[in-house]
Image (cartoon, helix red, strand yellow):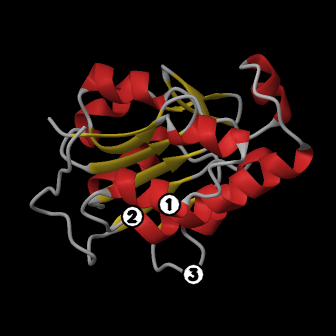
């Protein structure tokens, strides 16, 4: 997929991070650590989430999910009910199978397909690994995303920083990074 730089895409854009608390995805906090961004990590009412989305230009959604949206607190935190708000935003969707959600609703931005971040996911996809491979991949991925968010070609930039490709988890995940524009 080609490079896309929306008119409102600039380093000063107002950024919202939606990252439900979950120890298995805490490594993703490195993406926004030290940034002056609005971060939602608690289970807020839908009305508050809508208000925050409206007030921001870039919406970063992190954690566990599926083709139906971002999961948090045992329910879908972000689902089709938010699409009308997200269509004109630059979205960063990092959860398993976010690609299905983004493509179905024709959202703009960076997103992931299936991303392995835990051993059981690696076993599910028959990716041979060690415990160190998972930790190395998770840390490297979060830092690569953080350092590439403002890049004009975010997917290539992340791939160049998300190393080493000799790690089977990183190799698998590198093939599940996407960018789309409508």
Residue that extends furthest to the left in the rendered view of this protein: 7
- What residue sits right under mark 2 in the picture? 149
Which mark, by number, is residue 145? 1
Q: Earlier in the sequence, mark 2 or mark 3?
A: 3
Which mark, by number, is residue 34? 3
Q: Is residue 93 left or right of residue 5?
A: right
Alpha carbon separation for disc pair 3 and 1: 14 Å
Tell me if residue 37 comes above or below residue 142 in the rendering. Answer: below
Tell me if label 3 and label 1 are in contact, CB under 8 Å: no
> Where, quadrant-wise, is the C terminus in this rendering?
top left
Q: Is residue 88 left or right of residue 127?
A: left
Q: Earlier in the sequence, mark 3 or mark 1?
A: 3
Badge 1 marks a residue whose secondary structure is helix
Alpha carbon separation for disc pair 2 and 1: 6 Å
Q: Is residue 26 left or right of residue 80?
A: right
Q: Position of residue 55 (x, y in %)?
A: 29, 60
Which mark, by number, is residue 58? none
Rendered residue at 41%/66% (across/down): 148
Rendered residue at 41%/41% (across/down): 111
Q: Position of residue 141 (x, y in %)?
A: 60, 56
Alpha carbon separation for disc pair 2 and 3: 14 Å
Rendered residue at 39%/64% (across/down): 149
Q: Position of residue 131 (x, y in %)?
A: 90, 45
Neighbour class for label 2 at 10 Å: few (<14), some, many (≥20)?
some
Tell me if label 2 and label 1 are in contact, CB under 8 Å: yes
Q: Position of residue 72 (x, y in %)?
A: 64, 37
Q: Can you tell which of label 2 and label 3 is closer to the viewer?
A: 2
Badge 3 marks a residue whose secondary structure is loop
> Where, quadrant-wise, is the N terminus in this rendering?
top left
Rendered residue at 28%/24% (across/down): 105
């Amino acid at each position: 997929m080609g490079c896309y730089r929306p008119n409102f895409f600039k380093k000063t854009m107002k950024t919202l991070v939606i990252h439900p608390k979950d120890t298995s995805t805490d490594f993703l906090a490195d993406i926004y650590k030290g940034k002056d961004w609005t971060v939602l990590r608690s289970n807020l009412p839908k009305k508050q989430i809508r208000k925050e989305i409206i007030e921001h230009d870039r919406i970063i959604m992190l954690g566990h999910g599926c083709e139906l949206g971002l999961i948090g607190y045992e329910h879908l935190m972000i689902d089709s009910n938010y699409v009308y708000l997200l269509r004109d935003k630059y979205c960063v969707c990092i959860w398993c199978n976010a690609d299905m959600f983004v493509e179905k609703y024709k959202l703009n931005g960076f997103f992931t397909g299936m991303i392995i971040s835990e051993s059981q996911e690696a076993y599910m996809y028959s990716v041979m690994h060690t415990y160190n491979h998972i930790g190395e991949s998770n840390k490297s991925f979060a830092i690569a995303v953080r350092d590439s968010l403002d890049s004009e070609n975010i997917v290539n930039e992340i791939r160049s920083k998300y190393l080493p490709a000799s790690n089977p988890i990183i190799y698998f995940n590198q093939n599940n990074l996407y960018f789309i524009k409508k």
